[in-house]
Image: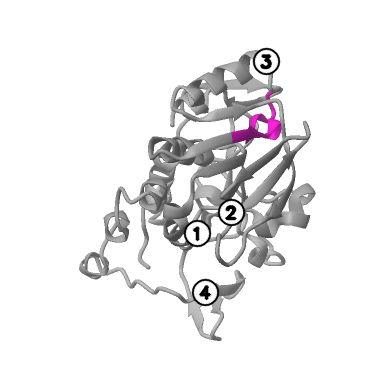
Amino acid sequence: FPYYYRHMLRQYIVGECDEQDMVVQSPEEYKERRIRLRLGQKVSSLDPDSRTLYLAHMEKVSYTRLLVCVGSVPRIPEVHYRYREHLTVMSTLRHARALRERMGDIRRVVMCGGDMVSFRIATTLAAHDKEVIFLVDEDAFWPLELTDERREDFAAALEEKGVTVRGDDVLTGVESTGTEESGDRYVVRTKRDAEIHCDLVGAFFGLTPAIEWLQGTGLDLERGVLVDEYLRTNRPSIYAAGDCAEIYRPDLRNYWVSRGWPNALRLGEVAAKNLLGGEESVDEPSTNVLQVDGIKVSTAWWREF
């Protein structure tokens, strides 16, 4: 499937748009711009010394300059591993297609974790007459402490849109109770000994950069690919942008992970100019940030969905 607007997946699952509505550029438009579009061909490894990419079907592709923008994958904390098969994630069209097929049978949803994606999905489902119960993970606010004031603030924002928030309770277990006749059904257990019967358990514990395939390449990696303010890695001619990149901010003396569609657009523009030999730096983070122990973090992102 061609490149698509990922932020529209929440509209797609409830039928507000179709797949073609999410396409950024058609294959014909790539061709008109002299861009060779190759779909479904996985890159398995990288050799920076020879400037070569190795594809899963054994083809080699050489490059003059390389932009790594492989994004990220949903994170499931280890504490939830034993029942992770019952947890539903949604970060790709493949996930959304499966969820859209089930939407007619879903009445009650339990959302676990907490990030911008989950808040947008929760409010979209509530607007389509689904009962949504949100168990908020305190780590969603790291490094800020989840104070009573902050808890009440975001809970009010969600409840105003029809979502029930349980900010003082956490997920401890999920069991499947569904049958072939009834379809998917679950019992969610929480720290406060609650049992919630539902049709879907959404897991939104943040994202992990999809960079395992870059281990051993000599690129500086931590949580993501480390780049400077010009999106350059430590290896010549290799750049990184988007969810997979940790961008150095001289003003913070630390690395910053950019999230959200506007940031993705901006990073793409900066990367393109610098791939062509420019020296354009990434802009300051967006508003609604607070500096805590030298780290700037969003303090009210739940108001922006």
Residue contact between numbered discs 1 and 2, judged by CB atoms under 8 Å: yes
Identify the mark nearer the N-term, 4 or 2: 4
Q: Residue at x 43, y 32 (%)?
A: 305
Element carrying mark 4: loop
Provide the residue designation for mark 1: 95
Please name the residue that numbered disc 3 is placed on.
148
Q: In this view of the protein, can residue 280 be seen by the observer?
A: no
Residue 42: assigned label: 4
Q: Residue at x 69, y 51 (%)?
A: 76
Callout 3: SS:
helix
Q: Could you tell me how far apart the alpha carbons at marks 1 and 2 are, in whole angstroms?
A: 8 Å
| Most foreground residue, 272 or 139 | 139
Q: Position of residue 228 (x, y in %)?
A: 57, 44
Q: Residues within 10 Å of mark 1 (few under 14, many from 20)?
A: some
Does residue 84 belong to the magenta stretch?
no
Could you tell me residue 25's position as x and y percent? Answer: 27, 60
Q: Residue at x 54, y 79 (%)?
A: 55
Disc 3 and disc 2: Cα gap in Å? 29 Å
Nearer the observer: mark 4 or 3; the answer is 3
Amino acid on which disc 2 is placed? Thr
Q: Secondary structure at mark 1?
A: helix
Q: Is residue 20 above or below residue 251?
A: below
Q: Which amino acid type is marked by label 1?
A: His
Crowding at dot 4, Cα within 10 Å, few <14 / some 14-19 / many 20+, comes out as few
Residue of label 2: 88
C-alpha gap between disc 4 and disc 1: 19 Å
